[in-house]
Amino acid sequence: MAAPCTENNHKQGKLEFVLDVPFPSSREASIALQSLSPDREPRKGGISKELTVSGCTLSVRWRADEARILRVSVGSFMDHLSLVMETMEAFGPPVSVTTQTVSSTMT
Amino acid sequence: MTVVIGFEGSANKIGVGIVRDGEVLSNPRRTYITPPGQGFLPSETARHHRSVILTVLKEALEEAGLKPADVDCVAYTKGPGMGAPLVTVALVARTVAQLWGKPLLGVNHCIGHIEMGRLITQANNPTVLYVSGGNTQVIAYSERRYRIFGETIDIAVGNCLDRFARVIKISNDPSPGYNIEQMAKKGTQYVELPYTVKGMDVSFSGILSYIEETLFSMLVEITERAMAHCSSQEVLIVGGVGCNLRLQEMMGVMCKERGAKLFATDESFCIDNGAMIAQAGWEMFRSGQTTELSDSWITQRYRTDEVEVTWRD
């Protein structure tokens, strides 16, 4: 959900949006993270997002100056996320690997 | 034995191709065609690619008779091209690479065209004319780089032809350039228009009433100039505009005069396709390159000479 800044957010006037996406396994949540994080936001300023994985959940947190910019970025992300999930549905489950790395990235 | 699958979707074509040691096992493709008078925009193009890419991927595997386990490397177009379509394709490539546990390779689209041209024609070390809707470059290989000898200083020749087709509302099916070529065959009147070659480079913008003759003559001139500089006896034409038989004919005349050989491929390989990305990926993979997931971001600008060509001497 989107909320105006509170005392918790030291940047005055920033909007925030948080999305939690459950996956069947932490491996699949990681795969989604690695697929969705490399590309930079098309718009240089006014928006940032952070992707993290915790357990089986992919979390995305946006910070934006304007609602319009936030909406566009979140909308795009949802399209991309659903494509990744459809791909995993069609071509999964992932082959087994001996090690798993879970990482967080900032774009 | 090395099997590479390649994903391409930087403009309005979406293709997935599989290559095994110089053999194209499958190369299905779909084209997003807009109504006459309309070009294709990034978000709509991305939507089109998204709606068909998984189907095309399945087709590629089925036609090749392969399972994901048989693939050694997943190649995709890193750039150049339109942002939203590039991202759509990269997302699928990254995801299947991880699902299948295979290394990933980001490929330069122009180099995809060059490596497919070299594979299909077996040209040894040609001067390359790369002409498409998005690119116009004359390229020669030297010391681990595909050097750009000459290029358009504004728009690509294919873009010029596409915009001309839009103005006079020619159909975009199968492509505007193809329909211009068919109409031009019936033309009888040559109209003399400004001819803009500047040294090694060309300019196409602002003059959208060009007929093919002038555009193609300019391209033949700069290709010849590059050949003279490199003492080259081979020309390879790649890119969608390379399908044009008149361009091939005109280039052929120049080559004959110089005692040089002309190479061109047919429309399955001139026009953007997945196998060309797989082929360039095959060369790169065999010479030890892979792309880390965190470096796999797509880029709308990606010059042909930015890539270190580790697979050639």
Image (cartoon, coloured by chain):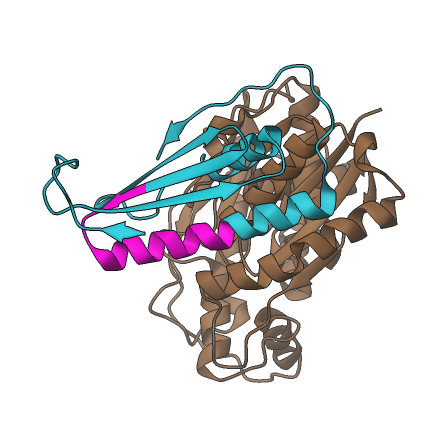
Chain colours: A cyan, B brown
Determine if the magenta segment contains residue A76: yes
Is A16 rendered above or below residue B148?
below
The answer to which quarter of the image holds residue B171 is: bottom right
Determine if the magenta segment contains residue B224: no
Residue A96 seen in the current view? yes
The answer to which quarter of the image holds residue B64 is: top right
In the image, which residues are magenta?
A62-80
**B153 left or right, relative to B127:** left
The answer to which quarter of the image holds residue A94 is: top right
**Residue B152: percent from the left, percent from the top?**
41, 52
Front position in the image: B189 or B68? B68
Quarter of the image for the C terminus of chain B: give it: top right
Task: Give the residue at the far right of this rendering.
Answer: B65
**A100 left or right, relative to A42:** right
Is B21 rendered above or below residue B241?
above
Residue visible at 46% across and 75% down in the picture: B164
**Residue B174: percent from the left, percent from the top?**
66, 72
**Residue A51: percent from the left, percent from the top?**
41, 34
Front position in the image: B138 or A81? A81
Residue B260 seen in the current view? no
**B54 left or right, relative to B64:** left
**B139 left or right, relative to B283:** left
Task: Give the residue at the far top of this rendering.
Answer: A98
Quarter of the image for the N terminus of chain B: give it: top right
Magenta highlight: main SS:
helix
Residue visible at 67% across and 38% down in the picture: B96
**Residue B217: percent from the left, percent from the top?**
52, 60
Is B143 rendered above or below residue B271?
above
Residue visible at 34% across and 57% down in the picture: A72
